[in-house]
Image (spheres, rainbow, N blue to C red):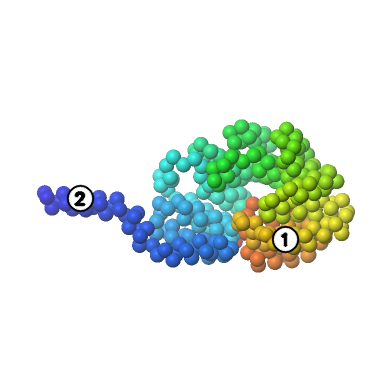
Amino acid sequence: MIKFSFFISCFFLITCDANQYRTETIDKSAITAATTASKNGEWLKAARLYEQLYLQELDKEEWNYQAGTNYLRANKPKKALAVLNTFNKKQQTPKQDFNGRIARIAKAYYKTGDFKKAEKVVENYSYPKMYRGLAREHLKALIQSNKIADLATYFAKYQQIGIYDDKGKKTNSGFLFRAICNELLLVGNANLLAVYAEKYNQWVNQRQAVDKRNLAIAHFYQNDYSLAINNLKEAIAVEKSPRHLMELRGLLGVSYAKNKAFEKAASQIQKIQSMETLPTRHDAFGAKLYHQARIEVALNQREKAIHTLKKAVIAKAAFWSNRFKEDGLMKELFGDANFEKLVEVKE
């Protein structure tokens, strides 16, 4: 009896300490290698390394998240889903305010064109804070499915309950307005785009006059390029974020092109390329080339734009939201064999 009790005690001790033991046995250099690969823009390498780590600790949600995220960056949404959907919900961190990993699942379904499943992911989301990336993919999926009434309903809901970034900080509605306007431009729904662009403009004016960036972008989506040019210049003058500054200069170049001020449009490419500070996020790689390509498309320089995008890929640009095939400003390139090969989803 004593021997049996001793055996049971040892069993529970080993079982309870299993996670700790596995963590200790994982070579720290493997974690460093995965982190470094991701920081260096080696998306596929990072994805595989994180997947290997995750398979050693199936309750490690962060490694599952990182594996799925990097497979998405490598333009492998099906593989991302294969990894992300293996995680057992029972292992999710308790009392968590939000979950960005769920947004990656919705993103992967969006990229594979399975919009119903993207909607289903949102229905099953049970966290108190709505992660903004998940809300964005949801609204985009509704637009792709032409569920216009649902779009209005859920957008109003997200404005009411609030959306939160990856630090749990509340984000203003401009994030979703920009996503909606881009997606409506992408699907070619000009009438509804005019409606939401006007709502966007009204929202900015009601919010605060100092939000020059959103005001400029709202006018841009209203096709009021003359007004957008003035607003973009004002926004550029006060913008401190390299990521936003690069976007604003890109939109200014596009606006000049739309207004047939071709030399001024080209000058924005030079200003973007001369920027010394890159964004610190995942879209740093190839960002200058990406925004250059947007201007080149507006200038009707399609072959040059595709060549620029190829260079962006070589520079390890991530296939992320509002990039390449998901960018309404790239529509003129859709159907071109070279462009389609560039953005083709990988198995």
Q: In this view, does 116 lie above or below 59?
A: above
What is the x, y in percent for residue 332?
78, 55
- Residue type at the position of mark 2: Ile
What is the x, y in percent for residue 89?
43, 45
What is the x, y in percent for residue 195?
76, 36
Q: How many angstroms separate mark 1 from mark 2 (CA)?
A: 65 Å
Q: Is mark 2 on a helix, strand or loop?
A: helix
The residue positioned farthest toward the left in the image shown: 1
Q: In which quarter of the image is residue 178?
A: top right
- Residue type at the position of mark 1: Met
43 left or right, relative to 278: left
Which of the two labelled residues, at mark 1 and mark 2, occupies the earlier sequence position? 2
Q: Visible in this render: residue 38?
A: yes
The numbered disc on residue 275 is: 1
Q: Mark 2 points at which residue?
A: 8
Q: Which residue shows up at 84% across the image and 53% down it? A: 256
Label 2 neighbour load within 10 Å: few <14, some 14-19, many 20+? few
